[in-house]
Amino acid sequence: MVGLLEPASPAMPLVDGPARSPVDLSIVIVSYHCRDDVLTCVASIAACTDRAEVEVIVVDNGSTDGTLEALQLEAPQVTTVAMGDNAGFSRANNAGISRTGGRHVLVLNPDTRVAPGALDALVRFLDEHPQVGVAAPRLVNPDGTDQRTARSFPTPAAGLFGRRSPLTRWFPRNPWSTRFLSGRDHTGDTPFRVDWVSGAAMAVPASAIAEVGAFDESFFLFWEDADWCKRLADAGREVWCVPEATVVHDEGSTRGHGWSPRVAAHFHRGAYLYWRKHHAPQIWNPARWAAAAVLTVRAAWVMAVDRALASRRTARPSAPSAPSAPSALPLLPPVPRTSR
């Protein structure tokens, strides 16, 4: 990698002479009370020896843990944007995307670490395949196992046969899970086409963003990545996973906050918005109201289960104990410390 570029001065006047070529990749990271994660993520980018020329933009959603101050001290080459409060994942990413100057944009979660060669692989794939709308790396856990985030577009069955659902754990080869987790059987470094990839790491050409727009800001948290992939697909753009590019995603570092009522509400509201937008746009469509009812009941159930689990944890003795077995709650994704 040529190196992280020094941020341009704001409102820089135009001058005569040859224009500077755009960088290969603009990396946008949204932070929310996760200073150490952000610093580790930025350090992993800086440590890459990739040839791609990149710029890094960190958009902070009102953190009070010194994230911006730490970046200014330890990574002054990074451009920072202060939202002032928690503006949500979509809006914060869009604020960063609007400031990018790269040929391609990589949306990246702060709880990730970029492996050497990943940036070059993503840039090369997008350059060689102009019809592609998204190129995603293989997201892996810290132990190297695949996170199974390359999926088919969500359907009602995905609520029961998602990547963390008990039914998928108990019957991993059932046809519904197999259909939804369409990328899990792809091994090796050969790229493969999918419907939907995680917003934790997705590279999108600037031309595709100009064509269909960035994230839909109606989605505060969750499901904005599925919506973006769907809009790109509807515009004739393809979504691909590029396993040669690897990004470590430490989802475990973001699970300690439980499913607060607010986060559970955002998750289910996002699911409803996705369904309404892409499957039941007509106000008279009964599928719209059926989805609203089912998701409302499900959100209430999730909140009740979380309260019960929290009460049980509080009632336990303070002495160390063995880790508890996973509960039935993993039907849903973990709650991140980031805005996602």
Image: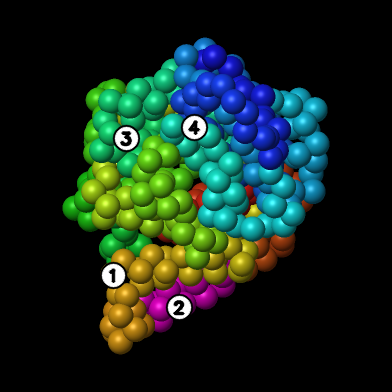
Badge 1 density bin: few <14, some 14–19, many ≥20, Cα 10 Å: few
- Label 1: state its secondary structure: loop
Residue at 49% across / 27% down in the picture?
22
Q: Are marks 4 and 1 in contact (CB under 8 Å)?
A: no
Residue 256 appearing in the image: no
- Residue occupied by mark 1: 279
Badge 3 density bin: few <14, some 14–19, many ≥20, Cα 10 Å: many
Camera-nearest label, 3 or 4: 4
- Label 3: state its secondary structure: strand
Q: Is residue 296 magenta?
A: yes
Position above or below: 60 against 299: above
Q: Spatial distance from mark 4 to mark 2, Cα to Cα?
A: 44 Å
Q: Earlier in the sequence, mark 1 or mark 3?
A: 3
Towards the viewer: 49 or 235: 235
The magenta segment is 291-306
Left/right placement of residue 153 relative to residue 315 reads left
Q: Spatial distance from mark 2 to mark 1, Cα to Cα?
A: 20 Å
Q: Earlier in the sequence, mark 2 or mark 3?
A: 3
In the image, farthest residue toward the bottom: 284
Residue 297 circle label: 2
- Residue 141 placement (x, y as % from top left): 47, 33
Residue 119 circle label: none
Position above or below: 195 against 111: below
- Residue occupied by mark 3: 241
- Residue 231 placement (x, y as % from top left): 33, 55
